[in-house]
Image (cartoon, rainbow, N blue to C red):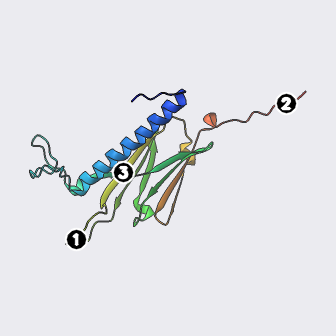
Amino acid sequence: MRIRYNNLSDIANDAATLNDVMNRFFNNVASEYSRNGGNDGRNDGSNGAANGSEPVKPAERESNLPIDVWVTPEAFQVSAYLPGINPEDVEITFEGEELAIRGKLPAAPEGAEFVKRELYHGAFARRLSFTVPVNADAIEATFHNGLLTLSIPKAEAVKPKLIKIQTK
């Protein structure tokens, strides 16, 4: 099957769609791997360890926090669901060109015998690099009903400027 493109925009849209699909696929694979306690299905008791190295203990793993990111003419917007977490227990830093969000979801009840276990418990983190200059001093974070929202303003130099036409 041969696909014909009319312009570069069509190619870019297909590439972005493929990228989204691949990201979702690998995030789901990693999520399933974490839920299985790091066991990748080998059933050899190695808990995901390779070449005789030490297995990663569940308490030491960090989950990749799922986020939504969108852009407006003035700022980047980031949102993440953090149910059951106190805002004081979330650390947000911006250093260089990188935003980092870290925290820990509440632990499962001690000694619980699960019939089904799908919720993630433990540390999470997410790093996001910006290739466009942003105003780090004006970043705002809000937390409402378990939804963390960040507004990361673009630097004045990269904001679109409206140029008015003057008539003479």
Residue farthest to the right?
Answer: 168
Residue at which label 1 appears: 115
Picture disc at residue 166:
2
Against 93, is 114 above or below? below
Return the disc, 3 or 2, that comes first in the chain's sequence: 3
Residue at which label 3 appears: 125
Against 56, is 81 above or below? below
Q: Say if residue 16 shows up in the picture.
A: yes
Q: Where is residue 37 in the image (x, y as percent from the top left)?
A: 20, 56
Against 31, is 135 above or below? above
Question: How many numbered circles does the render carry?
Answer: 3
Label 2: which secondary element: loop
Q: Characterize the local packing of mark 3: few (<14), some (14-19) or many (20 or more) Cα atoms within 10 angstroms.
A: some
Rounded to the nearest whole Å, what is the CA distance between mark 3 and mark 2? 50 Å
The kind of residue tagged 1 is Val
Q: Nearer the viewer, residue 109 or 38?
A: 38
Q: Say if residue 96 shows up in the picture.
A: no
Instruction: Quarter of the image for the N terminus: give it.
Output: top left
Q: Characterize the local packing of mark 2: few (<14), some (14-19) or many (20 or more) Cα atoms within 10 angstroms.
A: few
Q: Characterize the local packing of mark 1: few (<14), some (14-19) or many (20 or more) Cα atoms within 10 angstroms.
A: few
Camera-near label (1 vs 3) is: 1
The kind of residue tagged 2 is Gln
For the point 25% across and 57% down, the residue is: 35
Rounded to the nearest whole Å, what is the CA distance between mark 1 and mark 3? 28 Å
Rounded to the nearest whole Å, what is the CA distance between mark 1 and mark 2? 71 Å
Corner quadrant of residue 163: top right
The kind of residue tagged 3 is Ala
Q: Where is residue 130 in the image (x, y as percent from the top left)?
A: 48, 38
